[in-house]
Amino acid sequence: MCAPKVISEKKMDLDDILGKFGIFQSYHLQMMILTFFAFVTNALYSANFVFVAEEVNYRCKDDLDNSHSCSANSSQLCSEWLYDDPDSFVAYFQLACQDWKRTLVGTVHSFGYMCGLLLVGPMSDRLGRKTAVIITGILGGFFGIARSFSAWYWFYIAMEFLEAALGDCCSPMYVLTIEIVSTKKRLVFYMMCGFGYCFGGMSLSLFAWLTPNWRWFLRAIYLPTFLFFTYIYLLDESPRWLLTKGRKDKAVAILEKAAKKNDMVIEKDVLEKLSCEVSPDVPYKELLKDTFKSTKLRRRFFVCLAWWTASTFVNYGMIINSVSLQGNKYLNFALVASVEIPGNIIVTYVLINFKRKLPLMFSFFVGAVLCLALPFIPDDLPWVSISFFMAGKLMSSFFFAITYMYTSELFPTYTRNSMHALCSSLGRIGSIIAPQTPLLITYWSGLPSLVFGTVSFLAGLTTFLVPDVSDDLLPDTVVQAEALGKSKIPSKALENYNEGDISQL
């Protein structure tokens, strides 16, 4: 057996110590698997309504020539409706001529997710990343299974809202992911974990194909989420979060556990000299208020909000419209999800070599051009139209992935998850509106793509207002966050500030 590797004894900050761990060694490989599964569940949660509440053709039983159409008083004209799929969601809840109730499922999910992030973000910052991941993961499974037994439409809608609001672990799991690896290895580690989104999207179409009954479909995709109970024993808290809370002993214990798992030894003296700014022991509202006192951080917040709104609107809008493409709807959905695989690889390579700002602007602007050109492609060239659509979806996956990481790197540790969740939450207005974009086709078939392109272009312009980041360490305080894009401020410099003045942190 090889002798344990010894880390040299010198003063280090947390990023220096994390840099000694390989992301493909035992400890981080286990964390990668746990994160991968969490991201799979996020993909299953966020888009299952596409198949559950899918459109089903129907006709009036007395309408033998199929000439009956819905009207304001259709309920009086038809006593009984016949559905092409009598076991469907639409048939069970008798939603004939009530398409708004069918599309409401997706809108309520996005609205619930938007509201939930305002709760999950602060919970993650106050109680810890691990606690938030476990609670939301288990609740997601509970509400999802409850929906599968629903006998009333509005009960189903209520469970949809609660599941989206309290049952999605993506936000705290993402923040934990970027906090347990060093700055230089963060991109590659997240890329590997991010394949969970792709696998989840492709698995969703497979589950939908294998279990066409919407009740059993929901049970099939939500039952595995109870594996989050095992995270109580398998998942460790973020050492960075623990250090900012003043719980250095617990952070050191986790680092020692990780080193032991990787057959490494970290000298006690090194861990004792571990430095990280401790967030002030003040109410959460004061910490958040202090973040917004900074003009620079306030401007970044509004820019990030524009990114998130555009990303959710365009990305989800294109996913929803993918099942309307010619061909097998399950295959089409899986193909759109599979675009994320090369997308993850390409965007990771680009971010490593070109930082954040230029790739984000490029993806927004190229995506805008592709979407704006799509309506003007001749109808007799369907392969060109599909190619432009897939390329546009690839660009949307680019700027969504970059937005996710860029946002988390612009704010200090003690409000990072809260600011990330706030931007993501308010930006979900885009995904709330996205399910309604097919209605624009009644005015002009190319109008949805035109809107997608315009929104992408405007979001790209806002990127000029924020600093570029890449090799900067994650900021722990407002001062460090404001210094992003400039010369790095060492932690010792902060000692000159008055500890009683929160605004200096």
Image: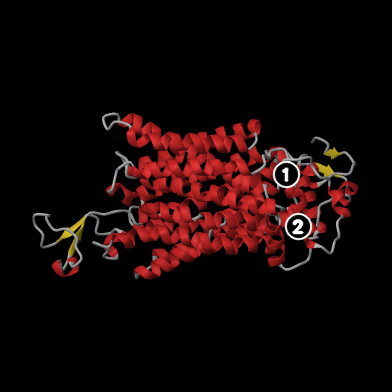
The Cα–Cα distance between marks 1 and 2, rounded to whole angstroms, is 23 Å
Q: What amino acid type should be assigned to the residue bearing mark 2? A: Leu
**Is residue 5 positioned above or below 222 on the image?**
above
**Frontmost residue, 375 versus 13:** 375
The C terminus is located in which quarter? bottom right
Q: Secondary structure at mark 1?
A: loop
Q: Secondary structure at mark 2?
A: helix
Earlier in the chain: of badge 1 and badge 2, it is 2
- Residue 340 spot, x, y in % from top left: 49, 39
The N terminus is located in which quarter? top right
The disc placed on residue 484 is 1
- With 152 as the anchor, is 280 left or right in this view? right
**Is residue 276 positioned above or below 6 on the image?**
below
**Quadrant of the rendered image containing residue 393:** top left
- Residue 304 spot, x, y in % from top left: 59, 49
The disc placed on residue 36 is none
**Frontmost residue, 110 versus 149:** 110
Q: What amino acid type should be assigned to the residue bearing mark 1? A: Leu
Residue 140 visible, this angle: no
- Residue 155 spot, x, y in % from top left: 39, 70
| Residue at screen point 70% across, 45% down | 27
Q: Which residue is mark 2?
A: 242
- With 117 as the anchor, is 329 left or right in this view? left
In front of the other: label 1 or label 2? Answer: 1
Residue 408 visible, this angle: yes
| Residue at screen point 15% across, 66% down | 78
